[in-house]
Image (tube, rainbow, N blue to C red):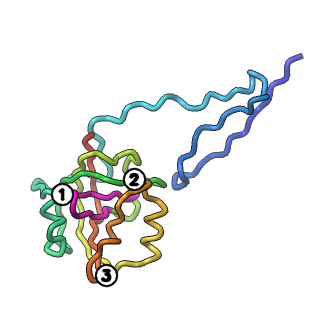
């Protein structure tokens, strides 16, 4: 007589950290083996998130990052290299010009970007804002960052950090 073992796997919510697929215990019968997950497919060369772009002019990240105060309260479309993405939900990312860094947050958590987007070139459209550095918020970002990633708020001058609130993002891999 054969026995079938049914394994119950917990369901992860969108903002939980990704974990390795569950495996059947080593002493479980072959019938209990659970197929881990479908092999990951390569990400598309271009991925668009959020709304459609509305601005034609694209500002290089180096221009924005060199003088972010000049862009505060302006809607712009910027292009730069992504160095980190929120690993819990994809609700923020960081762009860089190798010297300066800026956090990009999705507007009202209305959309999420691919968590494996670091290394991509991104175009981002949104509003540039100036914020006071808040230690609790910085600790939250640190908890969601990739290991060893730069935290833009750590280099803030006069306790002010600059961010973009994105309406649209496009990754080019």
Horizontally, residue 82 falls left or right of residue 75, namely right
Q: In what element is the residue under mark 2?
A: loop
User: Which of label 2 and label 3 is nearer to you?
Assistant: 3
Measuring 46% from the left and 59% from the top, which residue is drawn there?
144
Q: Main secondary structure of the magenta part?
A: strand
- Mark 3 = which residue? 159
Q: Residue at x 22, y 51 (%)?
A: 123
Q: Which label sits on residue 78?
A: 1
**Distance between mark 3 and mark 1 Cα atoms:** 24 Å
* Residue 100 appears left or right of 30: left
Quadrant position of residue 34: top right
Residue farthest along the left direction in this orientation: 57
In-image side of 157 versus 15 (left or right) = left
Instruction: Residue 94: give x, y in percent of width and height.
Output: 31, 58
Local packing at callout 2 (Cα closer than 10 Å; few below 14, some 14-19, many 20+) is some
Q: Residue placed at 38% from the left, 65% from the top?
A: 108
- Image x and y of residue 67, in percent: 15, 71
Mark 3 surroundings: few (<14), some (14-19) or many (≥20) residues within 10 A: few
Element under disc 3: loop
Q: Answer above or below: position of 157 versus 15.
A: below
The residue positioned farthest toward the top in the image shown: 1
């Amino acid at each position: 007589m054969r026995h079938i073992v049914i394994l119950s796997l917990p369901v992860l919510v969108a903002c939980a950290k990704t974990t390795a697929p569950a495996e059947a215990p080593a002493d479980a019968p072959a019938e209990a083996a659970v197929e881990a997950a479908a092999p990951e497919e390569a990400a598309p060369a271009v991925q668009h998130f959020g709304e459609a772009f509305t601005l034609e002019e694209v500002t290089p990240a180096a221009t924005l990052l060199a003088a972010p105060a000049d862009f505060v309260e302006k809607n712009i479309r910027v292009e730069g290299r992504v160095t980190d993405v929120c690993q819990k939900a994809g609700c923020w990312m960081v762009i860089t010009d190798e010297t300066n860094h800026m956090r990009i947050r999705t507007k009202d958590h209305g959309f999420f970007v691919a968590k494996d987007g670091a290394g991509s070139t991104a175009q981002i459209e949104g509003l540039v804002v100036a914020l006071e550095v808040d230690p609790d918020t910085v600790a939250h970002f640190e908890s969601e960052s990739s290991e060893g990633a730069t935290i833009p708020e750590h280099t803030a001058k006069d306790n002010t950090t600059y961010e973009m609130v994105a309406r649209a993002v496009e990754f080019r891999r």
